[in-house]
């Protein structure tokens, strides 16, 4: 009877370890300082950002934008990189709400969808979603910038 109990406990422990390994997650959080570069009519807007926190850099594009009743919607993509060599690719939706009385300034909310199979280095196999919010100043096409707070968790 003692052998059966020990075997059952061992099987339970191994099952728990496998579950923990199957759900290995990384918390993401920090601040981004994005700059936006207009490449001309009909071209995507390029995004380059320094990040502080669990991710150190980001690059991306605004692929399309649509006017809404409260501001803009943007289809976006990003590449996020970490100092440990890991990176992920995301396809995103940005919601920009116009700041009343401040033309060209928006409150920004983005949902980042990490694409399966697009992780590199230490982030191979990770996917999921994370979010950000912040403010962007898009008044001057030669000096568009923002301040963004990001947070969430990605898992494999």
Image: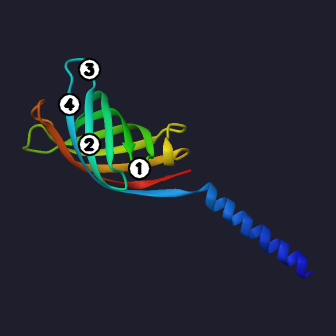
Quarter holding residue 143: top left
* Residue 112 position (above or below residue 155): above
Question: Which of disc 2 and disc 4 is earlier in sequence?
Answer: 4
Of all residues, the one furthest to the bottom in this rendering is 2
Q: Which residue is mark 3?
A: 43
Question: Which of disc 4 and disc 1 is earlier in sequence?
Answer: 4
Q: Which residue is mark 1?
A: 130
Q: Answer with left or right where residue 59 lies relative to residue 19.
A: left
Marks 3 and 1, Cα distance to the nearest angstrom?
Answer: 27 Å
Q: Which residue is mark 4?
A: 37
Marks 3 and 4, Cα distance to the nearest angstrom?
Answer: 10 Å
The nearer-to-camera label among 1 and 4 is 4
Rendered residue at 78%/74% (across/down): 9
Question: Which of disc 3 and disc 2 is earlier in sequence?
Answer: 3
Marks 2 and 3, Cα distance to the nearest angstrom?
Answer: 19 Å
Q: Position of residue 149 (x, y in %)?
A: 28, 53
Question: Which of disc 1 and disc 3 is earlier in sequence?
Answer: 3
Q: Which residue is mark 2?
A: 49
Number of numbered discs: 4
Question: Which of disc 2 and disc 1 is earlier in sequence?
Answer: 2
Coloration of the structure image: rainbow
Circle 1: is it few (<14), some (14-19), or many (20+) Cα within 10 Å?
many
Q: Position of residue 131 (x, y in %)?
A: 36, 49
Q: Position of residue 24 (x, y in %)?
A: 56, 57
Marks 4 and 2, Cα distance to the nearest angstrom?
Answer: 11 Å
Which disc number belongs to residue 1? none
Query: Do labels 1 and 4 touch, CB within 8 Å?
Result: no
Question: Which element type, helix, strand or loop, lies under badge 4?
Answer: strand
Circle 3: is it few (<14), some (14-19), or many (20+) Cα within 10 Å?
few
């Amino acid at each position: 009877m003692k052998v059966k109990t020990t075997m059952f406990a061992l099987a339970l422990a191994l099952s728990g370890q496998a579950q923990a390994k199957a759900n290995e997650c990384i918390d993401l959080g920090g601040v981004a300082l994005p700059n936006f570069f207009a490449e001309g009519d009909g071209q995507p807007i390029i995004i380059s950002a320094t990040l502080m926190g669990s991710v150190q850099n980001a690059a991306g594009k605004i692929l399309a934008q649509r006017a809404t009743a409260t501001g803009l919607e943007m289809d976006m993509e990003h590449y996020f990189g970490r100092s440990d060599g890991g990176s992920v690719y995301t396809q995103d939706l940005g919601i920009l709400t116009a700041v009343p009385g401040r033309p060209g300034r928006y409150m920004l909310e983005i949902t980042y969808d990490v694409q399966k199979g697009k992780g590199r280095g230490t982030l191979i196999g990770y996917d999921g979603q994370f979010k950000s919010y912040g403010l962007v100043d898009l008044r001057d096409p030669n000096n568009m910038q923002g301040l963004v707070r990001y947070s969430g968790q990605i898992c494999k």
